[in-house]
Image (cartoon, grey):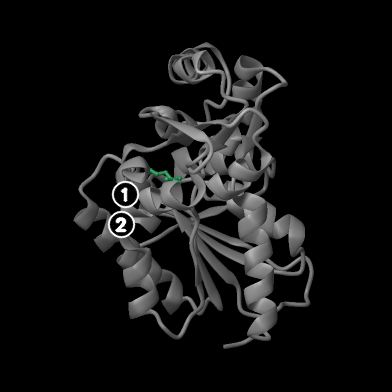
Amino acid sequence: MSQTAPIGIFDSGVGGLSILREISNLLPEEKFIYLADSAHCPYGIKPVAQIRERTLEVTQFLSELGVKIIIVACNSACVAGLDQVRTLFADIPVIGVEPALKPAHNLTRNGKIGVLATNLTLKGERFSTLIKKYGTGVTVFTQAAPGLVELVEAGAIDGYQTENLLRQYLEPLLAKAIDTLVLGCTHYPFLSPAIKKICGPEVLLLDTGKAVAKQTARVLEEKKLRGDQPNGQNLFYTTGPISTVTPVIRKLLASPNIEVLAASV
Ligand code: DGL
């Protein structure tokens, strides 16, 4: 495995770009291969076995491109198949994501935490384990949020329709007087400005991007895989229609020259 190899990162769609953005901010000398599995998005409403299979296929695709580490930048994919990815791709370091309950537990002032995530994430064993670990002494209110992933996939990160749906999900949490809101899906950080508008400045929003970036730095350091060549070329792939996905990736990363390639996986 070479230091100059890219970091492989994937999500059901464009959500994992919120993780890529944080890793890239922390490690500007790294280059990335990003895969948006847009043809199969959203994952969170599909049977676990189906998402697990996709997760393994997509990991295989990235590993064949010679990545030095794999970031499973999707909570739903982690619920469905992170353990299997680690077992089957034991020679590549693999990093997953999880809702930021640990920092929420430390940072809440009134002990009332809201979690916004996909159905699959909230129902999964990983989430129950997190609640057992970090749900003591606080009250955690969960809210599944179907439809938000699709809006982000369409680049609709603000506007009437998005705010309307967000209000539907956030108002019940705000009624419980939460002071901390965990964004338990990697798509949601792109909705942060709209969420802040609804929740107001008193509610602390937490996502996992920065923690995943730090963990990536630690693992690369430990394995002596840290890159040292800034301005490397990132590659973006999608399994969906290029003409739809390209403008959304450009918008979310505020990078108008990104070209997106078709992934045959
Ligand atoms: N970004 C994915 C996550 O973090 C979205 C899941 C989905 O496609 O439903 O869960």
- Residue type of the residue flagged with mark 1: Gly
Above/below status of 53 relative to 44: below
Q: Is mark 1 on a helix, strand or loop?
A: loop
Q: What element carries label 2?
A: helix
Tell whether 164 sits left or right of 46: right
Rendered position, 173 above or below 213: above
Q: Give the image quadrant in which the ligand numbered 1 is located.
A: top left
Side of 228 where 212 appears, left or right: left
Q: Is residue 31 visible?
A: no
Q: Dot 1, how many residues are within 10 Å of its Cα: few (below 14), some (14-19), or many (20+)?
A: some
Q: Are marks 1 and 2 in contact (CB under 8 Å)?
A: yes
User: What is the x, y in percent for residue 17?
Assistant: 57, 49
Question: Which residue does the numbered mark 2 point to in the structure image?
Answer: 80
Number of other residues with Cα within 10 Å of mark 2, as a class: few under 14, some 14 to 19, many 20 or more: many
Where, quadrant-wise, is the N terminus in this rendering?
A: bottom right
Q: Which amino acid does label 2 sit on?
A: Ala
Relative to 187, 104 lies left or right: right
Give the residue at x 62% y 26%: 179
Disc 1 or disc 2, which is closer to the eye? 1
As drawn, the label of residue 124 is 1
Q: Position of residue 232 (x, y in %)?
A: 72, 68
Q: Which of the marked residues, 1 or 2, is nearer the chain's N terminus?
A: 2
